Amino acid sequence: MKKLILYTIIALAICSCVQDPTKDLLVNIGDEEKVYATLSSEDDRVELTKSLKMVWTEGDIMYVVGPNTRKKYKFDGKTGDRGGSFTLTNTYTPYSTALDRYYAVASFYSISLMTSGRIRFNSPETGTSVQKHNPDGCSEVNNNLVFAESEDGKNFKFKGVLSYLRLSLTGDKIVKSINLINNADKAISGSYHIYIDDPETVWFKNDYNPLPTILLDCGEGVQLSDTPTDFYFAIRPMELSAGITVEVSFTDGTTFIQTTSKPITITQNTIQPMAVIKTSDVEYQQINIKHTGTTFTTPTISGGTSLVGYIEFGDGTTSLLNLLTSYDYTDSQTEHTISIKTRNADTIEIDNCDGIIAIDLSNF
């Protein structure tokens, strides 16, 4: 086995403040046919307005379950309303489990009674691995779910099940997309569910491919400037123990990378802001490797404490530096060009050179 060693640094600060986007959102049930609310979403999703308040959207769906109760309601108001009524659309056979309280939920995929007697609310099957930036508000987020409970079934105070992480960027380019990566390689997206007796915990559904990434799609692009532009990610409450990496892709084909190893605590129903990131005037080291075969032994990249970067394997797959020891290509091509983009690296070590036919170090 041939061995090759070649010789030749950024942080995200965490602001201490958080905000509660659903504070004081009350729902009052007036009669058997109406639920009066102060919350809204679009196409069964909850979104934030520019004022960081939850709003309802035309046609939103709400379920109420409780003692001898299982009913479905539809929002009567218009998109952007904070208040309005829900009209009863369906009444179902109550669950056999003996519930002693009433529960209401909006923006979800399905509801089911578990064998243990617990009721579970599921998010849409599409999951949250791809979200859309909304220039008219904060985010257009699939699967954000709000939950409330009540003793009398007449008054509900909603609370968001997920949270938001806010990135603020400056620069002079147009953002195409932003990839948020959990450095601990644990899931931050995918379909999920909550139980009525444990609404503080969001459980990922194992059969819907939980992922350690969230991609924010910026559509035709968002122009950056010297004034920070905010981007929001809906994310489940959790401890990001190894920090995060942010990959910003621009419309001109370039990429900006920022990372931190500092733990980040995501608290339920809050907005977690990060320090402003400057994306201008950033240069990257780059190594291009031509390889033949079906499996590539990934190099080990070394550098200072602010080492950052990623590997593009040439088949559409991207990985963080030093995350994989080897990679099996996902396409049928016999030759690939692997691009390693990094900052603050001083050493690249390749333990197995089999299949490597060329290495370009001109930009390293």
Image: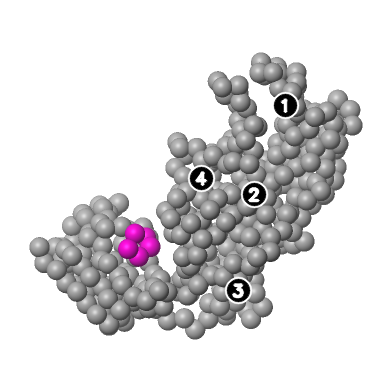
| Badge 2 element | loop
Q: Please, what is the three-letter code of the amino acid marked with disc 2?
A: Gln
Which of the labelled discs sits on residue 190, or is there none?
A: 4
Q: Magenta residues, as a range?
A: 319-323
Q: Give the Cα distance between marks 2 and 4.
A: 17 Å
- In this rendering, the answer to whether 34 lies above or below 221 is above
Name the residue at 77% across, 61% down. 51
**Mark whose residue sits in front, 2 or 4:** 2
Q: Please, what is the three-letter code of the amino acid marked with disc 4?
A: Gly
Q: Give the Cα distance between marks 2 and 1.
A: 23 Å
Q: Which residue is mark 3?
A: 276
Q: Is residue 263 or residue 322 the one in the foreground?
A: 263
CB of mark 1 within 8 Å of CB of mark 3?
no
Q: Please, what is the three-letter code of the amino acid marked with disc 1?
A: Val
| Badge 1 element | strand
Question: First in sequence: mark 3 or mark 2?
Answer: 2
> In the visual, does 192 lie left or right of 87?
left
Q: Please, what is the three-letter code of the amino acid marked with disc 3?
A: Val
Q: Give the Cα distance between marks 1 and 3.
A: 43 Å
- In this rendering, the answer to whether 97 lies above or below 281 is above
| Residue 300 visible in the snapshot | yes
**Mark whose residue sits in front, 2 or 1:** 2
**Mark whose residue sits in front, 4 or 3:** 3
Q: Residues within 10 Å of mark 2 (few under 14, many from 20)?
A: many
Name the residue at 20% across, 64% down. 291
Q: Residues within 10 Å of mark 4 (few under 14, many from 20)?
A: many
Question: First in sequence: mark 2 or mark 4?
Answer: 4
Q: Is residue 171 or residue 121 the one in the foreground?
A: 121
Q: Give the Cα distance between marks 4 and 3.
A: 27 Å
Question: First in sequence: mark 1 or mark 3?
Answer: 1
Q: Which residue is mark 1?
A: 65
